[in-house]
Image (cartoon, grey):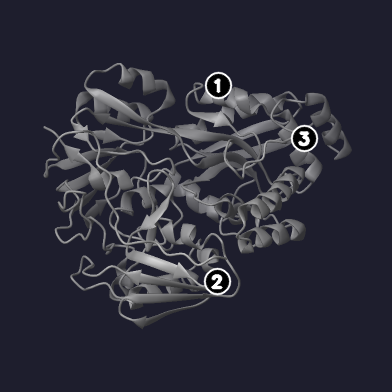
Amino acid sequence: MRRFAVALGLVALLGAGGAQKSGGVLRAGMQADPVGLDPHTTSATATRNQLENVYDTLVRFDSKGKIVPSLAQRWSVSPDGLTWTFTLRPDVRFHNGRALEAADVVYSISRIKDPAVKSPRAGDFAVVDSVTAPNRTTVVFKLKQPFAPLLAKLAFTLNVIVPKEAAATLGNKPVGTGPFVFVEYIPNTRMVLQRNPNYWERDSKGNRLPYLDGITYIYLPDATARTTALRAGSVDWIEYVPAADIQTIKNDPKLDVVGGLSANFRSLYFNLKEKPLDDVRVRQAIAYALNPQEVVDVALFGAGGIVAKGTTIPAGGFYSYDKSPYGKPNLDRARQLLREAGYPNGFTLDLKVTSTYDFLRAPAEVIQAQLAKVGIKVNIQAEEWSVYLPNFIGKKFVATIIGESGQGDPDDFLYNPFHTKGGGNYMNFSDPTLDKLLEEGRATADQEDRKAIYDRAQERILQLVPMVPLFHSAQYEGLATYVKGFEHFPNTSYLGLRTTWLDK
C-alpha cells in the first residue's frame, strides 16, 4: 500500500447563492424518536440523524461520498498498511468546555471495541490491535492486518469521539464537539439542540458555523402529518417525504424537495433458526416467488426507490453485482423447491414489520399477496419502532422487512450483515466459505482484487439467501423555500444541516 497524506483544510459547502444569514431555529419534522441517545450503543438511524450534528468523527464523508478531514486534519499510513497516524486539529472543545485531546480518541475507539459496552459496531475495529496517543494531538492506530475500510468506519456518524468524563451519562445527555449542543429530549414530542458558539469549523469566508441558532426536532411519525405540517408552515423541513407526496410538494411554490437514490438496502430478512426458514430450499423458493418491481411500483409508488438487482450493494456501483437468479417471479421453480423441502401446500409465515416507517410497512402487503400464489400464508405483525427495533436486534422475529443505510464501503454492505460475527447479522446466518471471502475483502487494498472477491461473496449470498434484497430507497427531504444551504447527502446523513440557514 502506498504512503499517502491528506492535507489540512475542510471547506464547508455553501448552499444556494446569496449572503448567509445567522440566526433562527429550524423546526424539523422527524419520522421517529431516537432509539437510545448513547451513540456507541445504538444502531438506530433515527438516533444517528438527530445526534450526528452534536458530535464529530475523526474523519467524515462529504456530500459526494469522499472522505475528508474532520477532527483529524491529516493522516498517513505506513507502507505495510498496519500503522495509521492521525493529527488532530487544534482548538477543538467539547460542549462541557474541555479541550479535545488524542486520549479522547483512544478512549472512544476503545469504548466501541469493549465487549462490556456491547456496541453493534465493535466489529468495525476488530482488526485494531491498539490505539495510542503519543502526545495530545497525535493518535496512532496499529492494525493486526491491513484493513481497507478503516477510514469509512471512522467516518460513520455513530463512531463519534466522546469525553471520558461524560460517558456514564451519554444515554441521557449527549456531549460532543459538534456544531449543536444537546438541550433536551422529550419522548414522542421533541429534541432541542442549540448552536455551539465555540464550534471549530468555518465556511469558506471565515465565518463560524453553524448559521442556525438551533434545531428543534418535532416527532411526526405519520407520513401524511409531516407533509401537512410542512405545507401549513408549522415545520420548516421534513425528512422521509412520502413517495406519494413528492409531486404535491414540488407543485407548491413555497416548498422544495431535495434528494434522490440513497446508499442503502431494504430486504426481506429471514431468521435461520426458525423453521422452515432453516432450509435453504424454502428461502430460495420465497426469493423466486417475489416480484421486487411490483413492490417498488405499488408500495413505493414507483418513486421511492429502485429494485435491488443483486444483493445489498446498490446497482451501478463499482462493487455491485447484477447476476441474481431472482428478481422476476418464477412460480413453478418456487413450488418445486417447496415440494422438495416437504411443503407442497406451503406454510404460514409470520412477517414482522414496523408501523413507523411507511417504506418498510407498505411492502408487507404486496409480499403477502405474492407469496400467497405459492401457498405461503403471510401473517403480518406490525409494531411501533421503539418496540420493533429491540425485538429485531434481539432476533425475535421469523421474517421481517428492514435494511441499513449510510454505508461508504462495500464492507458495510456485506461484512456487517452476512459475516458470522458481523454487527448487523441478525439472521443467525453463518457460512465459513463466505466468512473467508469477506475477511479477504477487508484485507485487500487493490480495488480490482477486492471487486473479484466481492463478486464471489455476492454469488455465495444469492445461493444461500439469508435475506432477499428488495429495493434501494430514494430518500427525499421537503423544505420551505426560505430554508437555504441544506445539501442532501446520498448516504442518508443530515450533516447538511451544518450549513443550513433561514432567509426570512
Q: Quadrant of the C terminus?
A: top left
Q: Residues within 10 Å of mark 3 (few under 14, many from 20)?
A: many
- Farthest residue to the bottom: give it: 134
Disc number for residue 79: 2
Q: How many marks?
A: 3
Q: Secondary structure at mark 3?
A: helix
Q: Earlier in the sequence, mark 2 or mark 3?
A: 2
Q: Is residue 173 above or below residue 145?
A: above
Please name whichever residue, 440 or 75, is drawn nearer the observer in this view of the structure.
Answer: 75
Which label's residue is closer to the chain start, 1 or 2? 2
Badge 1 crowding class, 10 Å Cα cut-off, few under 14, some 14 to 19, many 20 or more, is some
Q: CA distance from mark 1 to mark 3?
A: 22 Å
Kind of residue sitting beneath label 3: Ala
Picture coordinates of residue 121 (x, y %)? 50, 62
Whether the residues at callouts 1 and 2 have beta carbons within 8 Å, the answer is: no
Q: Residue at x 34, y 45 (%)?
A: 494
* Pointer 3 residue: 285
The residue shown at (54%, 35%) is: 472
Task: Give the residue at mark 1.
Answer: 297
Q: Earlier in the sequence, mark 1 or mark 3?
A: 3
